[in-house]
Image (spheres, rainbow, N blue to C red):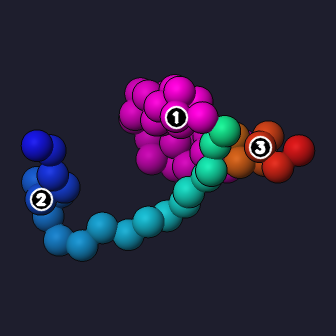
Amino acid sequence: MHTTKRLGGELTLLASVELASLEEARALEREMKRKRNPQLALWLMQKRRQAVRQ
């Protein structure tokens, strides 16, 4: 079982997006994890959120 204990103290949710399918959500997660820059990962999520709204 994986936990977030290794990350230390409390975690804060910075952004979320609701996607149409689990497959789409996992694809976005894989894409975000490949980004070394956290700001770039957030930008990617915001871009995806805008696309979902349209």
The residue that label 2 is drawn on is 5
Residue at 49% x, 64% y: name it.
14
**Residue 24 at x, y percent in the picture:** 58, 30
Foreground pick, 39 / 53 = 53
Q: Are marks 2 and 1 in contact (CB under 8 Å)?
A: no
Give residue 1's quadrant in the image. top left
Question: Please, what is the dominant secondary structure of the magenta stretch?
Answer: helix
In terms of sequence position, does the residue under pointer 2 or pointer 1 come before the other?
2
Disc sitting over residue 52 in the figure:
3
Range drawn in magenta: 21-47
Task: Inspect the image, locate mark 2, and give the three-letter code of the amino acid beneath it.
Answer: Lys
Task: Inspect the image, locate mark 3, and give the three-letter code of the amino acid beneath it.
Answer: Val
Q: Residues within 10 Å of mark 1 (few under 14, many from 20)?
A: few
Q: Is residue 39 above or below residue 13?
A: above
Looking at the image, residue 47 sits to the left or right of residue 31; the answer is right
Q: Is residue 43 on the magenta stretch?
A: yes
Q: Secondary structure at mark 3?
A: helix
Foreground pick, 6 / 53 = 53
Residue at 19% x, 55% y: name it.
4
Task: Inspect the image, locate mark 1, and give the three-letter code of the amino acid beneath it.
Answer: Leu
Residue at mark 2 to residue at mark 1: CA–CA distance: 25 Å
Looking at the image, residue 28 sits to the left or right of residue 11; the answer is right
Q: Secondary structure at mark 1?
A: helix
The residue that label 1 is drawn on is 22
Residue at 62% x, 50% y: name it.
18
Residue 44 appears in the figure:
yes
**Residue 19 at x, y percent in the picture:** 64, 42
